[in-house]
Image (tube, helix red, strand yellow):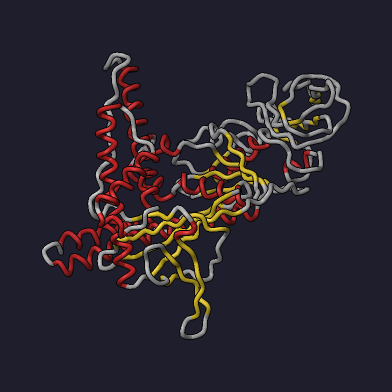
């Protein structure tokens, strides 16, 4: 079971717009009232009100003040949920700050927490409300003047049907909730409806020859795949920032004239929206293409916040903003979950420094964008090299989804034996490995022994010059019976793994 959201712009008339605006404003009053109630309760009992208790307070508020009866009663439940979540986050942050101060020795253990609270919402800082039950909203179809069947939105407490845009996109499932939001564009308001639908997720398929891909996300390129494809940014951020600076200067210059100020603010907010929309459109396109063309997607398990903290310059920080690494990962994961595809997350440590062909470690700084291996001679973009390494790590961390119990089905290519050149001696080494035939689920194997069956697989790895006589092989298998050993034969001498 998964959820999909259909977002569409709506165009209410003047009377409908007044009801929507009043509902948003009254919800803002209720939000501020509930924050005050939580403050008073915490001062007496040191606890946060539950959603049920806040709903009862909203009911008493409606009985005492008739003006709050203009809004739909069920929207209070959403306000209670928002206040509860905001207060919980504030308490978690206060506990985290107290624990850090205790660890540093600033305050003694057992000290009370210094509770912080959400900010009160002033006018213009609260722009949405939600219908949590499908009986409070609905989509109905009407016929316009030209005889065309169009879709319109019905909302509780709003008379008549509301005109909708985005008519061609069908509902992805059964509607559950609806969020109505407005956006101030300077000269006018834009209204949107986000309908959350519950749909059945596709069961994970097990193709006979699954296609796997490794994905490396970064700043210079938004994403690089192990197939050698690079996804660039759809917008020129430097050009957008220059225009943003120009529009911001015009807004500050026209403060004395209300008409010019309103127009300048409208241009600025339209430019902000265009920047966000171009970034989101590129992320949706990249994530859809990756999920549609692959069965297994191997990605890095990144902490985006830590990457921001390690930023080396202002331009690097802007690159993180323009890339939207966290949003791209989330969209790929959510689309893969709904499509029944498999996502594997691996440790990204060392993926950019290791050669994807021979396994040698090649140190590079961030300004070096090409990977040139001095041992095997591989020259490729560093992001593509990292994506291939990510794919290799994914092989050793998940069960084989294919029914064919062979390494060929697992890696999606032909099984073969690699020959590498040892630069230290100038000789060639042909490494052959014999493994048990059962490759489900994978684990690393090592040692010496005599297996029952034999299979030649792709071997990756090469000892660096001057190292000991051992080679790190990227081999995975699950041996049958008591055959947890492999034999690695070499023309010169035995190599142990």
The answer to whether residue 243 is visible is no
Q: Is residue 229 left or right of residue 142?
A: right
Instruction: Please tell me which residue is depicted at 78% across the width and 45% down the height of the picture.
Output: 414
Q: Is residue 465 above or below residue 400?
A: above
The extreme bottom residue here reads 146
Residue in front for this viewpoint, 227 or 445: 445
Q: Is residue 164 above or below residue 357?
A: below
- The quadrant of the picture occupied by the C terminus is top right
The extreme left residue here reads 256
Q: Is residue 439 left or right of residue 91?
A: right
Report which quarter residue 81 is drawn in. top left
The spot of residue 32 in percent (x, y) is 26, 45
Report which quarter residue 55 is drawn in. top left
* Number of callouts: 0
Q: Is residue 454 left or right of residue 3?
A: right
The spot of residue 253 in percent (x, y) is 15, 62
Q: Is residue 234 above or below residue 358?
A: below
The answer to whether residue 403 is visible is yes
The spot of residue 302 in percent (x, y) is 50, 37
Instruction: Please tell me which residue is depicted at 41% across the width and 37% down the height of the picture.
Output: 305
Instruction: Please tell me which residue is depicted at 29% across the width and 18% down the height of the picture.
Output: 111
Q: Is residue 181 left or right of residue 379?
A: left
The extreme right residue here reads 452
Q: Is residue 413 above or below residue 475?
A: below
Report which quarter residue 186 is drawn in. bottom left
Residue in front for this viewpoint, 132 or 275: 132
């Amino acid at each position: 079971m998964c959820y999909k959201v259909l977002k569409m712009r709506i165009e209410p008339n003047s009377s409908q717009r007044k009801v929507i605006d009043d509902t948003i404003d009254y919800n803002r009053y209720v939000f501020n009232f509930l924050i005050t109630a939580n403050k008073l309760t915490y001062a007496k009992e040191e606890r946060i009100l539950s959603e049920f208790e806040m709903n009862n307070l909203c009911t008493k508020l409606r009985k005492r003040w008739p003006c709050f009866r203009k809004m739909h009663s069920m929207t209070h439940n959403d306000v209670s949920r928002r206040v509860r979540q905001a207060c919980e986050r504030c308490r978690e942050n206060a506990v985290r700050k107290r624990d850090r101060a205790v660890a540093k020795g600033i305050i003694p253990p057992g000290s009370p927490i210094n509770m912080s609270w959400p900010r009160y919402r002033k006018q213009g800082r609260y722009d949405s409300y939600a219908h949590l039950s499908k009986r409070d909203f609905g989509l109905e179809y009407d016929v316009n003047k030209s005889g065309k069947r169009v879709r319109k939105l019905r909302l509780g407490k709003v008379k008549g049907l509301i005109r909708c845009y985005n008519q061609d996109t069908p509902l992805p499932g059964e509607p559950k909730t609806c969020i109505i939001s407005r956006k101030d564009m300077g000269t006018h308001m834009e209204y949107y409806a986000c309908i959350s639908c519950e749909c059945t997720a596709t069961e994970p398929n097990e193709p006979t020859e699954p296609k796997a891909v490794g994905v490396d996300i970064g700043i210079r390129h938004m994403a690089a795949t192990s197939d050698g494809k690079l996804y660039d940014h759809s917008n020129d951020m430097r050009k957008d920032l220059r225009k943003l600076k120009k529009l911001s200067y015009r807004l500050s210059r026209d403060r004395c004239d209300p008409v010019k100020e309103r127009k300048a603010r409208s241009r600025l907010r339209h430019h902000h929206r265009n920047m966000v929309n171009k970034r989101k459109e590129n992320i949706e396109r990249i994530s859809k293409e990756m999920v549609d063309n692959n069965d297994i997607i191997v990605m890095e398990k990144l902490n985006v916040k830590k990457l921001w903290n390690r930023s080396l310059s202002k331009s690097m920080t802007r690159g993180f903003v323009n890339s939207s690494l966290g949003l791209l990962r989330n969209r790929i994961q959510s689309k893969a979950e709904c499509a029944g595809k498999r996502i594997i997350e691996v440790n990204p440590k060392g993926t950019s420094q290791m050669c994807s062909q021979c396994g040698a470690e090649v140190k590079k700084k961030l300004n070096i964008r090409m990977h040139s291996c001095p041992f095997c001679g591989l020259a490729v973009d560093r992001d593509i090299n990292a994506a291939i390494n990510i794919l290799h790590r994914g092989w050793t961390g998940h069960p084989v989804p294919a029914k064919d119990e062979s390494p060929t089905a697992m890696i999606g290519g032909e099984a073969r034996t690699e020959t590498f050149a040892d630069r230290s001696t100038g000789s060639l080494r042909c490494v052959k490995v014999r493994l048990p035939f059962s490759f489900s689920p994978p684990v690393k194997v090592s040692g010496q022994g005599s297996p029952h069956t034999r299979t030649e697989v792709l071997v990756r790895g090469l000892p660096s010059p001057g190292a000991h006589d051992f080679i790190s092989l990227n081999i995975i298998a699950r041996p049958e019976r008591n055959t947890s050993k492999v034999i690695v034969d070499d023309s010169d001498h035995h190599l142990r793994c």
